[in-house]
Amino acid sequence: MERIKLPYMNPEKVSREIGDFVVDTAKKVGSTGCVIGLSGGVDSTTTAALIKKAFDAYNAEHDDKLELVGYILPSSTNNPKDAEDGVSVAKRLGIRYETQSIEPIVEAYKITNSEAVESLFHKGNLMSRIRANYLSTKAATEQKTLSGTGNKDEDFGIGYYTLFGDGAVHMSPIGNLSKRLVRQMATYLGFEDLANRTPTAGLQPDQTDFSDLGYDYDVVELVTEGFHQGFTADELDVHPQVKPLIEQQIDQYKEMFGKKKFNNVGEVIDDIYHRHYNIAMAKVEIIHPPTAEVTIEYR
């Protein structure tokens, strides 16, 4: 059976391409730089590091300086270590930052949207929208551009983000990088210690992306690339690159949580198909911030 090709990049070249995109996007609207939400995770860390690198290069040659500001916005559902990691990233990058709990705002919604606060799912999405409002308002008052931090697998692979929440941004610098490539870029930029941090949206207690989805982003990348390269669901079900990886993750999920989320490879492929074509692509039609065009080689 034909092999599924995966994207590869030159980190130095792609970092310059993303940096040029960010600077051009900011300058085009006359902003004074960028605002970004820092969670301590690999996506926000990598995005912030790319922007800081680009702004430093720009500022060395121009008088109209560009500034990156990081905001750490924890709630009661977040592990305190997340906020600590966010602060650590801001300090390592040498950027201005601020930590502000959103819990009082979440509590205030009990007055108008008590039904949302009572549901973990809706409360999580509410918190994401609160953060988006906070960040977009900061961006407006500081005359800055709000940078998103979503990667290709999350945003365009399975639509794993909150509409009008973390998807409500002015631009998406790493939107064309899979999670695997984001980890590679993080390592290149000096954040190898955070490259393999367990992905979590932080919207529910002890939540991880793997516990929600039942598979990781390597599976998302492989299966969605397979779809785009013309493989059918039945072909992917028995594909030698796909089948053993998904079977391993089905077993891993059962070992971690004491039960199966999916019974077989076909169920996982069907879930990714649904999320990709019925959720991610539907969200793209509603909100699609510009993404950096990057040089990717498939092999």
Image: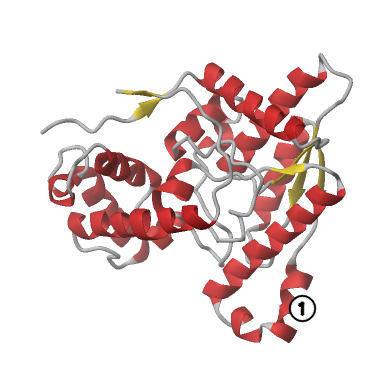
Q: In which quadrant of the rendered image does the N terminus lie? A: top left
> How many numbered badges does the structure rendering display?
1
Say above or below: 114 vs 189: below
Q: In which quadrant of the rendered image does the C terminus lie? A: top left
Q: What residue lies at 59% left-to-right and 41% top-to-bottom?
A: 172
Q: Is residue 215 left or right of residue 104?
A: left
Say above or below: 74 vs 185: below
Q: What residue lies at 46% left-to-right and 42% top-to-bottom?
A: 152
Q: Residue 189 location, x and y as percent?
A: 60, 25
Task: List the single residue furthest toward the top.
Answer: 61
Q: Is residue 221 left or right of residue 81?
A: left
Q: Is residue 268 left or right of residue 1?
A: right
Q: What residue lies at 21% left-to-right and 51% top-to-bottom?
A: 247
Q: Residue 53 location, x and y as percent?
A: 70, 24
Image quarter for residue 274?
Answer: bottom left
Q: How is the image coloured?
A: secondary structure
The answer to whether any part of residue 5 appears in the image is yes
Q: Residue 161 location, x and y as percent?
A: 52, 57
The answer to whether any part of residue 92 appears in the image is no
Q: Residue 256 location, x and y as percent?
A: 36, 59
Q: What residue lies at 58% left-to-right and 45% top-to-bottom?
A: 289
Q: Nearer the viewer, residue 239 or 132?
A: 132
Say above or below: 55 vs 34: above
What amino acid is at disc 1? Ala
Task: List the single residue furthest toward the right.
Answer: 63
Callout 1 secondary element: helix
Are there few (<14), some (14-19), or many (20+) residues within 10 Å of tag 1? few
Q: Nearer the viewer, residue 291 or 71?
A: 291
For label 1, the residue is 108
Q: Nearer the viewer, residue 142 or 209?
A: 142
